[in-house]
Amino acid sequence: MARSPFTLAAAVTAALPGAEVVGARILTAGGDGRFDSAVATLADGSEVAIRVGDDDETARELAAESIALRALTAGARAMLPFRAPDYVGETLLSEGRALVTGLLPGFQIEAGHVPGGRGAAESMGSSIAAVHALPASVVRSAGLTARSADESREDIRQLVDRAAATGRVPARLTVRWREAVGDDDLWRFESAVNLGGTQATSFLFEDDPEQGPTVVGILNWHGLSLGDPAVDLAWLSSAPDAASDVYAAYAAASDRAPDNALAVRARLLAELEFARWLVHGDLLRRPDIMDDATSLLESLSEGLRERDLSVIAARSEGVDSAMDALNRVPATAAARINTSMQTDAYNPEDLLPGEDTAEVVVGAEGVISDEVVLGDATEDLSDLAESDLLPRDETLNAELPVVEPVDRPGNDGSGSDPAEEAQRAARAALQRWTNSSSE
């Protein structure tokens, strides 16, 4: 693709008739380039982001994003303590779909660098809870996917069966996953509006002098749906320092019925990303993908504790859901994590191979199919490869994150205030990232 920012900016006038573009610049943060992206400056001083995709996959993602952003009415947006991109318009550019949205300011933090304590972790937890508190009508009125707990469970059952049918999944993982699917208590949850599997880099932060990094925006709404809230917490397997604080803040901010199995399902879903990758490779008849997924699954299996062959055991005994690390990550693990902003920062969750997608133009309405196609491509697996799902050169004994709020004493006797420690960690994270407006 590699279109120039000025070529992309020209599409803004087609998507937004009457708009006067006075400047353009590249919008990227080193992602994998699935989209051509740019920032266009309008005559009134406002800035918009434009993304263009040329293939069916990116076109579907942009179409889904368009519908999701329009489903967020003014009333729904008022319920959120952060901003979501505004829908501006869309058009076609050289037969590629172009989506124009408002530009959100802020910086991103990769999952492994999210510090625990006050600041980023707590803000992320409360922000996820706010999304999950949106009324179901936001999803249903837009015709987006809605799944009950039983339907979510059946999706997982089919995924496990499809993966096992390849003959590439270690037996102990198959046993573990099937026992989890068979555990009725694990699947007693209330469906919630969710982002379809958000990632750490979906959150945009600004630095608060008192609280540290605070979420001011969330990107990547193309997976907006109604279903298992655990999908938006699976990324915490890649954020060991922050996981317990994110869960605690989520629980404190949530007005939903307690879900004691939330953290367990989230970690189960993180494991199953490897299974999705395997099934995807099988569907495409790609031995390289299947070999990569097999290596990841074998590493995961080797890290299981002998006494911990099921998620049920993890929940009842408080162990680490068999995600202890080993001492190597397969060399063929997927590419580095995507950290781009409103451009190629995405999580391809629903590729729906072979499905025709209607073109969407400015003002058009559409409905995203709720058909489930197992084995669709998953998001970048490097986050998981670097998480505690897979090996590290150390002996881990972490406990499963809990959903109850955590009390933090003001002084641990060492003369160090945990809140101040968290602030320093948050500031350190801030130093590693730059504001998107500087790009």
Image (tube, rainbow, N blue to C red):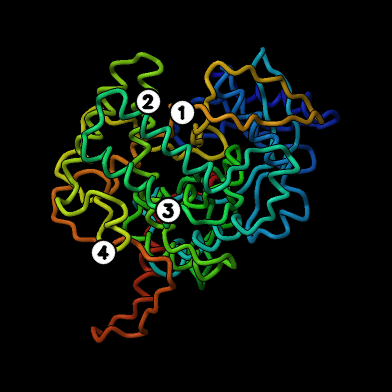
Q: Between label 3 and label 1, give the one nearer the viewer.
A: 3
Kindly identify the amino acid type of the residue bearing the numbered disc 3: Asp
Going from N to C along the chain, the mark reached first, 3 or 1, is: 3
Going from N to C along the chain, the mark reached first, 2 or 1, is: 2
**Residue at the limit of the structure toward the right, as seen here:** 18
**How far apart are the alpha carbons under marks 4 and 1?**
32 Å
Pinpoint residue 303: horizontal percent, then vertical percent: 18, 45
Q: Residues within 10 Å of mark 4 (few under 14, many from 20)?
A: few
**How far apart are the alpha carbons under marks 3 and 1?**
22 Å
**How far apart are the alpha carbons under marks 3 and 2?**
25 Å
Quarter of the image for the N terminus: give it: top right
Q: Which mark is residue 317?
A: 4
Q: Is residue 308 left or right of residue 159?
A: left
Kindly identify the amino acid type of the residue bearing the numbered disc 1: Leu
**Relative to 31, residue 81 above or below:** below
Kindly identify the amino acid type of the residue bearing the numbered disc 4: Glu
Going from N to C along the chain, the mark reached first, 4 or 1, is: 4
- Residue corresponding to mark 2: 279
Closer-to-camera residue (427/278): 278
Q: Residues within 10 Å of mark 1 (few under 14, many from 20)?
A: some
Say which element carries label 3: helix
Say which element carries label 2: helix
Q: Are marks 4 and 3 in contact (CB under 8 Å)?
A: no
Q: Are marks 2 and 1 in contact (CB under 8 Å)?
A: yes
Q: Residues within 10 Å of mark 3 (few under 14, many from 20)?
A: few
- Residue corresponding to mark 3: 184
Closer-to-camera residue (394/340): 394
- Residue corresponding to mark 1: 374
Say which element carries label 1: loop
The residue under the point 41% across, 48% down is 235
Pinpoint residue 59: horizontal percent, then vertical percent: 61, 23
**Relative to 428, residue 108 above or below:** above
